[in-house]
Amino acid sequence: MTKQELLEKIDVLLLDLDGTVYLDETPIGDAKNTLERLRERGKQLIFLTNNSSKTEEEYRRKLVRIGLWGAGDLVYTSGMATVSYLKKKHAGKKVYLVGTEAVRAEFAQAGILLDEADPDLCVLAYDVELTFEKIRRLNFFLKVGKPFIATHPDDVCPTKDVPMPDVGSFLALFKRSSGRDPDLVIGKPFPPMGEELSALTGVPRGRMCMIGDRMHTDVRFAANCGMKSVLVLSGETTRETMKNFPDKPDLVLESINDIL
Ligand SMILES: [Mg+2]
């Protein structure tokens, strides 16, 4: 796929965050201007993240603060995709949610019934406020056979220095203690988040493009969902490490700023 084809055939650009549009608190190069020009060309921009420790509003505030937010943009997290999935497939069911207080409030406001005593199913989000009591309780519900959904599979979350343990690391803990793997994982690279994005936008997946810096989440996600993909080399992946993965991105760019 050439850049020209990308700009002609794609209506929705799914933008990974860290390593793609910013590094920590700093936009990558002139990303602000690049995103503005994409909006002028009529592209719907959706900031897409697997990180389910923060809410839609928390991400929007950050993107506004660092100057990357524009009129018509959307934020979509694996937590929001999980809410949407639960409302469709488990309507009215009681959920034991392991998540931050802000994310628990986001689920409740969206109409998900949260229950800690006798839930119908369990959801593990990226809980940076995790306690032993929450671990004990989730392990109990897994041992008695409650359905188990994880928001996303990432082992670690990037930081300026040492990466932090993320949901994938906690899944390893629960596998050891309960013998259970999640019955379903919602976020990148798995298809449920792609299905929720199709429903959200009403745009066919062939007219959506995932732009990201990780082969095993961003590029794999596009391949799993029938979307186009752009790998940017401004984050985790280099031209060398790219070759260690089975998927081929449709386009490789040094950074998002090379898209125009
Ligand atoms: Mg990234």
Image (cartoon, rainbow, N blue to C red):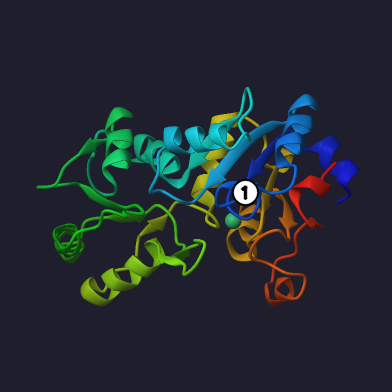
Q: Quadrant of residue 64?
A: top right
Left or right of 246 in this view: 64: left
Q: Is residue 187 above or below residue 113?
A: below
| SS under mark 1 | strand
Dot 1 crowding, Cα within 10 Å, few <14, some 14–19, many 20+: many
Q: Is residue 141 above or below residue 39?
A: below
Q: Which amino acid, mark 1?
A: Tyr
Of residues 133 and 117, which is closer to you in this image? 133
Left or right of 134 in this view: 117: left
Residue 138 is situated, as x and y percent measured from the top left of the image, at 20, 59
Which residue is labeled 1 in the image?
A: 22
- Give me the residue at 31% from left, 54% from top: 127
Q: Quadrant of the C terminus?
A: top right
Whether the residue under disc 1 has CB within 8 Å of ligand 1: no
Residue 90 is situated, as x and y percent measured from the top left of the image, at 31, 40
Of residues 101 and 203, which is closer to you in this image? 101
